[in-house]
Image (cartoon, rainbow, N blue to C red):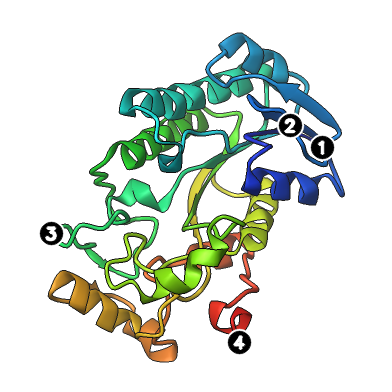
Amino acid sequence: MKILVTGASGRLGRRIVALLAKTDEVTAFDMKTVDSAAHHHIQADILDFGAVKRAVRGHDAVIHLAAALVAHKLPDEKLVQTNVMGTWHVFAAAAEAGVKKLVHTSSETATGVVFADPARPPRYLPIDEDHPLHPSEPYGMSKAMSEEIAKMFALRGGMTVTVIRPTLVATETIAPKLDALGTDPRNIDLWGWADPEDVAEAYRLALGRGGAPYDVFFISAPNTLSDIPTLDLLRAFYGKLPEVREPELYERDPHAGVFSIARAQARLGFKPHRDWRKLRA
């Protein structure tokens, strides 16, 4: 396939490009100087609709990673504009160009549960893709809105759209902090994490997905960063435990994650290969 990857110079983007470039023709798109294994490079901004339309033409698939992150510390209006309008540009350009597959990057923050507020517990555990979205801050809201854009274009027909919601991706800047994050009793990510190589593989799998024109997947490590059992962590954090719909999950692995990856395992064939406890041993 000919694949366009937006946000290709990011830490996750570079990994995805390197993986896909082994078997497919990859074009890297980023507003920064693109340094990747891609076969072609385009330096442009996703807020430049003309540039996005020119970039998308001739591609079979698009992976949309480009986004303003919380860590970028942009004004809220710029963050929302980049993530929402940028997503609109990518989907509109892809539809116009006849792209058949688009993999869009959302976030677990769209649920409103990450950046955790003790007054807003999840409705149930584990949190799956059917959990209501009630974001309470601009980044999560921008991701929830971008999912609505993705769904609208999928329902129009002609394009298979897959939305990936990674948990905290342990790239080079995050990996040194994992021990501290695991012992933090107020961890705003609810002790979740994902290995970047596993996340990159999930995007590759998403490109091969058949079935419904639209689907959403949490991508995460199977268990948390904490040595404390997950249900004990959440009981202490929220003052009481939310409804546990799959108690057998936490019986099999007391450290199982807050976000369910069962759908990704069943429909994508996703298999996380890295366990924090084994990595730090």
User: Can residue 29 be seen in the rendering of this structure?
Assistant: yes
Q: Amino acid at mark 3?
A: Ala
The one of 156 and 169 positioned closer to us in this rendering: 169
- Contact flag, marks 1 and 2 (Cβ < 8 Å): yes
Q: Is residue 221 above or below residue 267?
A: below
The residue indicated by pointer 3 is 119
Quadrant in which the C terminus is drawn: bottom right
Judge the density around disc 3: few (<14), some (14-19), many (≥20) Cα neighbours within 10 Å.
few
Q: Nearer the viewer, mark 1 or mark 2?
A: 2
Q: Residue at x 47, y 76 (%)?
A: 223
The residue indicated by pointer 4 is 281
- Image location (x, y in percent) of residue 211: 59, 49
- Image location (x, y in percent) of residue 114: 32, 56
Q: Provide the secondary structure element on which disc 1 rests.
A: loop
Q: What separation in Å lies between label 1 and label 3 (alpha carbons)?
A: 45 Å
- Contact flag, marks 2 and 3 (Cβ < 8 Å): no
Q: Amino acid at mark 4?
A: Ala
Q: Provide the secondary structure element on which disc 2 rests.
A: loop
- Disc number for residue 38: 1
Q: Provide the secondary structure element on which disc 3 rests.
A: loop
Residue 275 vs residue 140: left or right?
right
Q: Amino acid at mark 1?
A: Ala
Judge the density around disc 1: few (<14), some (14-19), many (≥20) Cα neighbours within 10 Å.
many
The one of 229 and 132 positioned closer to us in this rendering: 229
Q: Nearer the viewer, mark 2 or mark 3?
A: 2
